[in-house]
Structures are given as C-alpha cells and as structure tokens.
Amino acid sequence: MPRGGKSSKPPSEPTRRPGIRPLWTGHLKLSLVTVPVMIVSATASEQRLAFHQVHAPSGKRIKYDKVVPGVGSVDAQDIHKGYEISKGRYVLFKPEEIEDLKIEEKKTLEIVQSVGQDEIDPIWFEKPYYVLPDGDIAKEPYAVIREALRNTKRVGIGQFVMRGRDYIGALKPYANGILLETLRFHDEVKSAEEIFVDVETPKPARELLDLASELLKRKAAPYKPEAFEDRYEIALRQLIEKRSKGANILDIADTKRQETGAKVIDLVEALKRSVEAAKGTTGPDKPAPRSRKAG
C-alpha cells in the first residue's frame, strides 16, 4: 500500500454494521498513515429510565411556555442566549452568533504525541468512545496503529473537533479495536492541593494500618462490573411493572441496604472483626438475603 494509506484502486464504499450510529466520521492520522474511521459511544446511558411530567387528571404530558415575569409568553425569535456577568446583568447573543463560533470540523484526529499508559492521571479522563475502521480499505492501517500502540504500551494523544467543539482524545488499544477517551482541558480540573489544603490527619498507628491493609488484601479480586447492580434502577423498573399491571402500591423499602446504626467506638476491634469476617471471601461484600413482602 502506498505511503499515506491511499490505494491506487478506487476507494470502496464504507461497509458499516447495522445498528452502528457514528457520532463522528473522519480520519485517524499518524504521520503519513491516514485511516478512515468512525467514532461511536462506548456507553449506554440512554438505557436508564427517564420520566415525563404528566397532568394526573387528564393523563396528558405537561408542556412549558417560555414566559418573562411581568411580560408573559414570548416568541422564540425574541429569545437570545445570555451570559450573566453580574447579578441581573447579561451579555446577550443571537443564536447565529454562537453558531458562528463553532470550529470548522476538519474531520481529522491526528496523533501528535504519545505518553506511557500510566502517565495520565485518571482525573483527566472524561468519556469513552470506540474507534472503528470505516470500510475495508481502512482495516490494514487501522490494525497497524492499534498494534503499534499495543507493542509500545503507549497512548496516542490528539485533538479533534466534534459537533463544533474541541476535544482532546487519548487513544489506546482495547480488545480487538481502539478505545478513545476524551480528556478534560487544564482549566476543567480543580486543584487537589487547594481542595485538600485543610485536611490534616494524624499518622495512623501501625496496628491500625496493618489491620486495614490485611482487610484490603482479603478483599482482593478481579473487578467484575456485573457483580454490582443499580438498586435504584431495579426498584424503579419493579415499580413500573407493578403499576403497569394495575397495582397501586409497591413496597420497595427492602431494596435498600439496611444500616445497623450502631456506632463503632473501638477502631482496632472493628478492623479485627472485619478481617475475621472477610476470611474466605473475595470481591465486593454481598448484602444479606432480603425478604420480600407479597405484592
């Protein structure tokens, strides 16, 4: 294949799997190697339940009028974006003025530097995306970049534009593909030194430290996401299922973990008991079996 990742043959139409909805399409570039790619979300936050506000007597959804105190309803054309510079004082902008500020999308994500896999503090990471090759012609150069990142144990860093906004992207090999994690800009992270400046703690006693360390070792286990459940989401789904069948009441109190409420005064004794209780167990603590009332 010629340098730059371009073929002498006419480019083939991208072949995309059904159900794949790219948020961004463009080119991933490493020096002279250019790869057509698409970026898709790696998370499924839309799976969480969402509610609408409904007028109970009529059963119809509530819609909101845009009103100004003392004026009443206003037309959409009279609504501008405003930034409050002081209490009650705004700088106003027309929608098109904000639109004009959006950065031209060059559709290129170029790897401009690389860092070690452990060199970026986790606090800088924002949201994960999957990067996929876009079409058959992209598969070979895509694999080259993926395996180069894997072999060198490096993370590629680049900047790109998506939906008119700038993003910093960290690229790393993941499973059989490439994971892109957006990074926060330098002014989006609060200084840990400033936040913790007043946190003064005594040096832990050796016995306490040894017991706490032993407890953590006994809880060592590979992280398995499926071992944790969103108990609030489960309770909501149970409530919806019951209500949809005509039931009016659902007791969901038993979905909450019960707290003993006991105050532990002797920290050493508490740690010793915890270590003893953790013998033979690994992974997250499992809540005691819960009894359910008849629905």
Image (cartoon, rainbow, N blue to C red):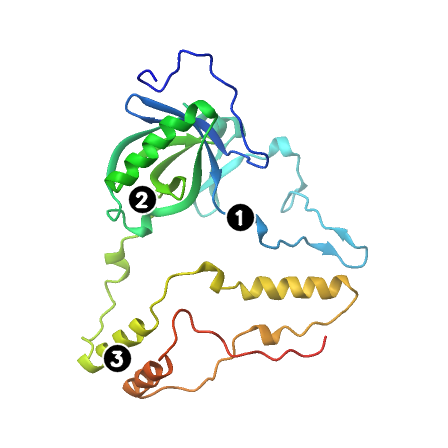
Say if residue 242 shows up in the picture. Answer: yes
Q: Position of residue 125 (x, y in %)?
A: 35, 47
Q: Secondary structure at mark 2?
A: helix
Which label is found at residue 44?
1
- Residue lying farthest to the right in this orientation: 58
Question: Total number of numbered labels?
Answer: 3
Q: Using the image as rendered, state which of residue 55 and residue 1 is in the foreground.
A: 1
Say if residue 104 shows up in the picture. Answer: no
Question: Which residue: 29% across, 37% down?
Answer: 149
The crowd level at tag 3 (other Cα within 10 Å; few <14, some 14-19, many 20+) is: some
Q: Nearer the viewer, mark 1 or mark 2?
A: 1
Q: Using the image as rendered, state which of residue 71 and residue 222 is in the foreground.
A: 222
Q: Of the residues shown, which amino acid type is indicated by label 1?
A: Ala
Q: Using the image as rendered, state which of residue 54 and residue 22 is in the foreground.
A: 22
> Marks 1 and 3, how far apart in space?
39 Å
Question: Which residue: 40% across, 11% down?
Answer: 8
> Marks 1 and 2, how far apart in space?
28 Å
Mark 2 or mark 3, which is nearer the start of the sequence? 2
Q: Of the residues shown, which amino acid type is indicated by label 3?
A: Leu
Q: Position of residue 139 (x, y in %)?
A: 42, 28
Q: Is residue 221 above or below residue 91?
A: below
Q: Which quadrant would the N terminus be assigned to in this image?
A: top left
Residue on which the image places disc 2: 187
Residue on which the image places disc 3: 211
Q: Secondary structure at mark 1?
A: loop
Mark 2 or mark 1, which is nearer the start of the sequence? 1
Q: Of the residues shown, which amino acid type is indicated by label 2?
A: Asp
Mark 3 or mark 1, which is nearer the start of the sequence? 1
Q: Secondary structure at mark 3?
A: helix
Is residue 73 rendered to the left or right of residue 168? right
Q: Which quadrant would the C terminus be assigned to in this image?
A: bottom right
